[in-house]
Amino acid sequence: METNKMILVEQFCSNCDINFSFIEALNENGVIEIVVVEDKKYILNEQLKTLERAIQFHYELNINIEGIDVIHNLLHQIDDLQEELRAANNKLKAFNIDE
């Protein structure tokens, strides 16, 4: 796997002053995924937004890991529902039915 599309967890934690245990807890709860390449742990760049949001929830709003997991799952469900709504609206437009 190409490591240029990933961020080294150790470096991220150092730069952002975040405990590695926090990142591991997010991984264990399925909020983010840690990828291991040659005994080094990485986070995919595409998960950076999720990780930054989790950091804000935890450090600024004092939300625990379980709460972050619930929020993450709810936000994912909202995204899925919005996509379904877009698809339904596109089908309606194809039949020239106005709202």
Image: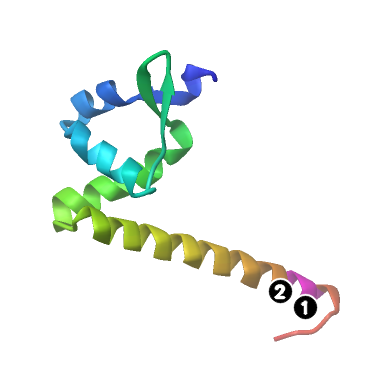
Please identify the quarter of the rendering in which residue 17 is found.
Answer: top left
Q: Is residue 91 magenta?
A: yes
Element under disc 1:
helix
In the drawing, does residue 95 fall left or right of residue 45? right
Please give the range of residues in magenta: 89-93
Residue 54 percent across, percent down from the top left:
28, 49
Report the Cα–Cα distance between label 2 and label 1: 6 Å
User: Are discs 2 and 1 less than 8 Å apart at CB?
Assistant: yes
Q: Residue beneath label 2, please?
A: 88
Q: How is the image coloured?
A: rainbow
Disc 2 on helix, strand or loop? helix
Horizontal relation, residue 85 to residue 11: left or right: right
Percent coordinates x, y for residue 12 in the rendering: 27, 27
Q: Count the labels in the image.
A: 2
Q: Amino acid at mark 2?
A: Ala
Counting from the top left corner in percent of width and height, residue 86 is at 65, 68
In terms of image quadrants, where is residue 61? bottom left
Q: Residues within 10 Å of mark 2 (few under 14, many from 20)?
A: few
Q: Which mark is residue 92?
A: 1
